[in-house]
Image: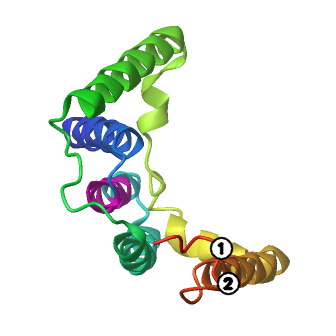
Amino acid sequence: MTYFMSLFLFGLVLGLVAVASNPSPYFAALGLVVVAGLGCGVLVGHGGSFLSLVLFLIYLGGMLVVFAYSAALAAEPYPESWGSRSVLGYVVAYLVGVVLVSGYFWGGWYDVSWVPADELKEFAVFRGDIGGVALLYSLGGGMLVISAWVLLLTLLVVLELTRGLSRGALRAV
C-alpha cells in the first residue's frame, strides 16, 4: 500500500507542476482532472472513500465548467503544449523548486503519517470519513453557508465580466 500511496503522491506533484507550468487552458484543465483523480486516490488510501467520491464528483463538475469557460475565452488556434521550450523551462524550474523544498523538509517525514483513518476499526462505530461529514453539517454549517454564498458571488462576478460582446470587461475579441 505504501508503494501505491507513493505513486499517487508522486503523480499528484507532477500533475500540479503540469498545471502550474502550462499557459494553455486546454492542457491545464486536463492536468487538473488528473490531479483531482490522484488526490482522491490519496484520500482512498487513507480511508476516506466517501469523501473521495464526493470530492471527485464535485471536481469533475467544476472542471467541466472551468474548461468550458477557458475554451470559450481562449483564442489560440495552436496552443503551447508540454513539449514546447518555454513550457519545458517552467517545468524544470518548478521541479527544481519542489526538490529544494522537499529536501528542506525531508527530516520531518515519518512513517506515522501513513496511518489511515480506520486503523482501530474494531473499536470504531462509524468510518472515519462519515464522521467527518457529520461534523461538517453539524458544527461547520455556518462555514458551509458562507462557502456557498462565496461560490455564488464568484459565479456572478465571472458571468458579469464575460457578458455580451460590448458590455463585458474581458471581451476584447
Measuring 69% from the left and 76% from the top, which residue is drawn there? 154
Residue type at the position of mark 2: Glu
In the image, taking residue 15 as reference, residue 83 lies left or right, namely left
Based on the displayed image, in which of its 4 quarters is residue 132 positioned?
A: bottom right
Question: Circle 1 sits on which residue?
Answer: 169
Image x and y of residue 110, in percent = 47, 22
Based on the displayed image, in which of its 4 quarters is residue 130 positioned?
A: bottom right
| In this view, 6 is above or below 41 | above
Using the rendered image of the protein, determine whether residue 84 is visible from the camera's viewpoint. yes
On whether residue 61 falls in the magenta region, the answer is no
Measuring 74% from the left and 81% from the top, which residue is drawn there? 153
Based on the displayed image, in which of its 4 quarters is residue 91 positioned?
A: top left
Question: SS of the residue at dot 1?
Answer: loop
Q: Residues within 10 Å of mark 1 (few under 14, many from 20)?
A: few
Image x and y of residue 16, in percent = 38, 43
In primary-sequence order, the first of circles 1 and 2 is 2
| In this view, 165 is above or below 94 | below
Question: Circle 2 sits on which residue?
Answer: 160
Residue type at the position of mark 1: Ala
